[in-house]
């Protein structure tokens, strides 16, 4: 068995289709299919059932899956140990983050880290917080930024360290005919045409829940956009949007207002695997995250005092 074949098998099972696995692994689909066929031939068993709705593991595949994941995690651990022997002249850090953080905090962290440690390879995965925690616990990520609110995340096997509390604000085009007031109630916001994020966003789930709790139905102008598109649509005057406060910085094309009655906020946490010694590169990344957050001075963003805030227990 080759590790790359086990990695391909695990990706197909996790994602449910050959197509999505090929996209994640940057493989042509015929190449991916050949790897699975080779692995099945090596083991003398059919591992995956192909159907119209995707691929599912057979009994043999379900038996192999936890073994494959352990082997892949052990291989990653070996690489981290060898990288550590070489110091920070080389190495790799795989960081996960929600899309709303990738355009703000994560961009700053990566810029600072790459300037200090140019020999370390950086890899970023964008996903929702629940998916990121699952990837972290499976050993696919070294560290992850995750969002918590009142509906706290289950984080068995992971340790969460609170980094900052962040307000959610309303943004509108700077050229909007009617200027935004300084404060907007949720009821007022519901009457404004909105540019809404894709439903996979943690931020979309938070705003939907806030409207539902007050029996409000927002007016949606455009739905299903990603972060960059949302901001561009707002700048063009298509509608307003609810975004994290950090996103507003250095956006002259936008104006923002605080949300009141109720205020909406979220906690940004750094997650790491519980009981697993991180590599030297991952430790350096963690320290730089703390340093970057401590130096954050933006309206609506409050760095949390004490690195152990929320450690080991997710909360909102």
Image (cartoon, grey):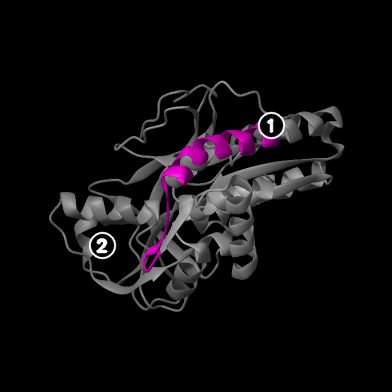
In percent of width and height, residue 155 lies at 42, 31
In the image, what residue occupies the spot 63% across and 63% down? 34
Q: Is mark 2 on a helix, strand or loop?
A: helix
Tell me the CA gap for discs 1 and 2. Answer: 48 Å
Q: Give the range drawn in magenta.
A: 51-76
- Nearest the eye: 310 or 179: 310
Task: Return the residue at label 2.
Answer: 189
Q: Is mark 1 on a helix, strand or loop?
A: helix
Task: Return the residue at label 1.
Answer: 77
Residue 103 higher or lower than 145, as above or below: below
59 inside magenta stretch: yes
Quarter placement of the C terminus: top left
279 displayed left or right of 36 = right
Number of marks in picture: 2
- Nearest the eye: 113 or 13: 13
Residue 252 higher or lower than 274, as above or below: below
Q: Residues within 10 Å of mark 1 (few under 14, many from 20)?
A: some
Residue 254 visible? The answer is yes
Residue 287 higher or lower than 135, as above or below: above
Quarter placement of the N terminus: top right
- Nearest the eye: 95 or 285: 95
In percent of width and height, residue 9 lies at 56, 51
Residue 201 quadrant: bottom left
């Amino acid at each position: 068995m080759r590790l790359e074949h086990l990695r391909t098998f695990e990706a197909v099972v996790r994602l449910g289709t050959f197509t999505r696995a090929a996209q994640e692994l940057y493989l042509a689909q015929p190449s991916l299919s050949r790897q699975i066929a080779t692995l099945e031939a090596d083991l003398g068993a059919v591992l995956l059932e192909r159907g119209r709705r995707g691929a599912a593991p057979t009994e043999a595949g379900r038996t192999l899956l936890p073994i494959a994941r352990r082997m892949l995690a052990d291989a990653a651990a070996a690489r981290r140990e060898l990288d550590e022997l070489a110091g920070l002249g080389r190495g790799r850090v795989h960081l996960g983050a929600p899309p709303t953080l990738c355009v703000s905090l994560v961009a700053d962290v990566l810029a600072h880290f790459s300037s200090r440690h140019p020999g370390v390879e950086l890899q970023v995965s964008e996903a929702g917080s629940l998916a990121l925690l699952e990837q972290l616990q499976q050993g696919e990520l070294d560290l992850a930024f995750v969002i918590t609110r009142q509906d706290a995340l289950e984080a068995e096997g992971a340790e969460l360290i609170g980094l900052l509390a962040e307000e959610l604000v309303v943004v509108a085009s700077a050229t909007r005919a009617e200027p935004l007031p300084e404060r907007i109630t949720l009821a007022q916001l519901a009457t404004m045409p909105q540019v809404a994020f894709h439903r996979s966003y943690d931020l979309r789930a938070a705003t939907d829940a806030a409207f539902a709790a007050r029996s409000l139905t927002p007016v949606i102008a455009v739905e299903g956009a990603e972060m960059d598109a949302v901001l561009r649509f707002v700048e063009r005057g298509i509608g307003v949007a609810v975004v994290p406060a950090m996103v507003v910085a250095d956006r002259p094309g936008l104006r923002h207002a605080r949300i009141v009655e109720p205020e909406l906020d979220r906690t940004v946490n750094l997650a790491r695997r519980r009981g697993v010694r991180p590599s030297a590169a991952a430790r350096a990344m963690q320290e730089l995250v703390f340093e970057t957050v401590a130096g954050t001075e933006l309206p609506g963003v409050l760095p949390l005092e004490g690195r152990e805030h929320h450690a080991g227990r997710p909360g909102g």
